Image: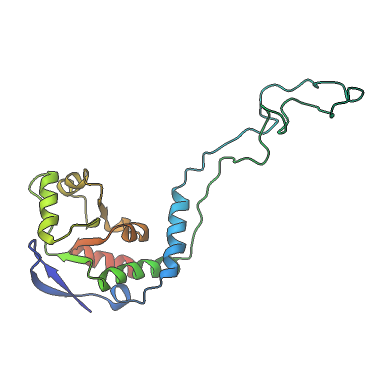
Amino acid sequence: MELDVIDRQGTPVEKIAVADSTFAAEVKTHLFHQVVRMQLAKRRRGTASTKTRGEVSGGGRKPWRQKGTGRARAGSTRSPLWRGGGVALGPKPRNYAYKLPKKVRRAALCSALSLKTQEGLLKVIDRLDLPAPKTKQMVGFLRDLGVQKASVILLVDNNPNVQLAARNLPEVKVLRVEGVNVYDLLAHDYLICTREALMKLQERVAS
């Protein structure tokens, strides 16, 4: 298939051929759930921790004798049944990350890119450069493109002016091609990239 390459004013200047397998694939929405869950699980810190009865300070002395008091037998004041005691089966530090097959992750990414293409939310521009790292210039750039919603901007290499100009815009995220992921594509409406970034993205998905 072919995509329009536009200038800063949104006027088509040329067409570029892209792979159907990447930008015109079948949209498999059920894969979105699997991959997003995997990404969010990988981001969890997993630092929640509670103390068991053996880790709580104190409780070494038996509170009262075993028999003859009329009360239930107790061996420690740090039992989970007692106030101030340990926690039974509480959380411990752990790693929540898990992996999905590479084919599943690739298919989900192709589905996300194809969905953007189908909905007309993929903007391929001829060049992306700002004379200065000013938020106002980034706002004007997006306005000229007709982009009024949350956007992901793809870069081939680090571009300090673009990255700094977008830093104060909460609905704009700047990523390098290597960092493109399903979660960010679904969380933002538009995908904006240059011709070079699009070709590199296609190579990454195909590899």
Q: Is residue 28 positioned above or below 147 on the image?
A: below
- Above or below for 45 versus 65: below
Measuring from the top left, give residue 171's x and y in whole percent. 25, 51
Image check: 23 left or right of 196?
right
Viewer-nearest residue: 204 or 24? 24
User: In which quadrant of the rendered view does residue 24 lie?
Assistant: bottom left
Depth order, front residue of 173/197: 173
Residue 114 can be seen, yes or no = yes
From the viewer's perspective, tell me whether residue 169 is left or right of residue 144.
right
Q: Using the rendered image of the protein, determine whether residue 195 is visible from the camera's viewpoint.
A: no
Applied colour scheme = rainbow
Residue positioned 52% across, 50% down in the render:
96
Location of the N terminus by quadrant is bottom left
Q: Residue sitting at 66 percent across and 29 percent down?
A: 55
The single residue placed furthest to the front in the displayed view is 70
| Residue visible at 17% across and 49% down in the picture | 162
Q: Which image quarter is the C terminus in?
A: bottom left
- Image position, residue 44 (x, y; %): 47, 46
How far across and down, in percent of the image, does residue 147 sit?
17, 59
Spot occupied by residue 36 in the image (x, y as percentages of width and height):
42, 59
Question: What residue sits 40% from the left and 70% below the top?
Answer: 107
Tag count: 0
| Farthest-out residue, right | 68
